[in-house]
Amino acid sequence: MTESAGHPASDQSPFAGRRVVLGVSGGIAAYKAVLLCRLLVDAGAHVMPVMTAAAQKFVGRATFDALASERVRTSMFGEDDPIPHTTLGQRADVVIVAPATARLIGSYAAGISDGLLTATLLATQAPVVVCPAMHTEMWEHPAVQHNLDVLAGRGVHIVVPTDGRLAGGDIGTGRLAEPETIFEAVAAVLAAEAAADHTRQPESKRDDFTGMTVTVTAGGTREAIDPVRFIGNRSSGKQGYAVATAARDRGAAVTLITSASLPAPAGVTEVRVESAAEMEAAVRERSGADVIVMAAAVADFRPADVAPHKIKKGELGDADTVPQIVLEQTTDILAGLGAAKLAGQVLVGFAAETADVLDNAADKLARKNLDVMVANDVSADGAGFAHDTNIVTILLADGTVRPMSKCSKREVADAVLDAVAALRR
Ligand code: CTP
């Protein structure tokens, strides 16, 4: 039933021979699932489509019947297979839901099986990629965001919607990601699974950092104004701790230089620091490490003079005189490491950005002579400070750009270490 492929699948394709359940729920964006189906089939995937009843109001099942590798399934009952949901779930290498409505996301998060698609999602052990699409108000509703956080916390990959024209002519966030973006995100999930499968083999279990020293920094530094006050930032340290934990699990001897107040992971050498200057000194002592990951949010500026006592109201004259804090620049620790990089050493930076994310990150990667840069849009929903999830793009010095869907900080950590391990080989 497969239409002839426009682009023949190469053996390198992460989709070659992989079984993909493509779940389509009811939304105007269902037409994009047709294009996604075509991309997947062209890449060599075996696509098994599942449509909800509502989806069939937007796209006819005949379209998917013609394009996919198997006939569309729509119901738990009345088709050849008495238990289609477990059969599909067990056969799948990955399950995609595109578009995923608020209702579908809610049912999945709550564990409610109210149709073949939700039943398949609950029955599968395969990785799941959920691609929401809905009106902006629904997308921003705390219930929807909470459900997505619940799913992401369980390891479900979320491909976030974009801004643009929505049903009814409205403009806003909630537009299904483009089929190519979803395709790339699923490719990354399959590639990561393949790598994890490989490392699950007994002879090469996750010990690819054995014998390596890894220095990780985490947390936001605090720059004293006086003995009581400081200038800080919103970094929680969670991403750096996840990197330290993952490196430890993969066999590295890890030093974690941290200004965060989280408990140190067992088996990791912890060095507590407060200011950028203390962090710089601690990093310098461990600058011979094989791998250095600067996940800390190091202050760029600090008060030029630190008052030796608590600054009191009125001490500068009359009660209305406010102290002026003059700032000076701190040392760029990572740029210093990059300028003196040792042979074979791998340097990783994190770029916390709120605009022009990839351009700024690529610029910092080159400027600081890094090998890997993790670009992080800290203003995106479910990303950045304090969240347990993150949405990052991994950039390599050779120009590789690897976008990741929303996932746990541990998954980001492992993807970063996968990139480091490949460079060390
Ligand atoms: N960094 C560092 N020392 C500093 C500032 C930043 O080592 N004084 C490191 C961070 O740990 C991070 C990377 O540099 O890994 C990028 O940090 P970021 O704050 O995003 O960039 P900046 O270099 O400060 O640039 P900008 O002010 O333009 O954002």
Image (spheres, rainbow, N blue to C red):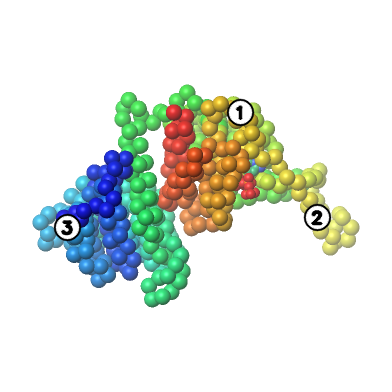
Is residue 147 in view? Answer: no
Amino acid, disc 3: Arg
Residues packed near mark 1 inside 10 Å, few (<14), some (14 to 19) or many (20 plus): some
Amino acid, disc 1: Arg
Looking at this rendering, what residue extends furthest in the right direction? Answer: 317
- Checking the image for residue 324, the label placed there is 2
Image x and y of residue 325, in percent: 78, 52
- Tell me the SS state at disc 2: loop
Q: Quadrant of residue 148?
A: bottom left
Is the residue at mark 2 in contact range of ligand 1, meaning its CB lies under 8 Å from it? no
Q: Nearer the viewer, mark 1 or mark 2?
A: 1
Image x and y of residue 381, in percent: 48, 58
Residue nearest the viewer, comparing 404 with 220: 404
User: CA–CA distance between discs 1 and 2?
Assistant: 36 Å
Q: Nearer the viewer, mark 3 or mark 2?
A: 3
Amino acid, disc 2: Gln
Q: Which residue is mark 1?
A: 286
- Tell me the SS state at disc 1: loop
Q: Quadrant of residue 195?
A: top left
- Checking the image for residue 71, the label placed there is 3
* Quadrant for the C terminus in the image: top left
Residues packed near mark 2 inside 10 Å, few (<14), some (14 to 19) or many (20 plus): few
**Which residue corresponds to the image point at 53% horizontal and 27% vertical from the top-left?**
344
Query: As displayed, is residue 270 above or below residue 49?
Result: above
Figure quadrant, ligand 1? top right
Image x and y of residue 95, in percent: 29, 51
User: CA–CA distance between discs 3 and 2?
Assistant: 71 Å
For marks 1 and 3 on the same chain, the one whose residue lies earlier in the sequence: 3
- Tell me the SS state at disc 3: loop
For marks 1 and 2 on the same chain, the one whose residue lies earlier in the sequence: 1
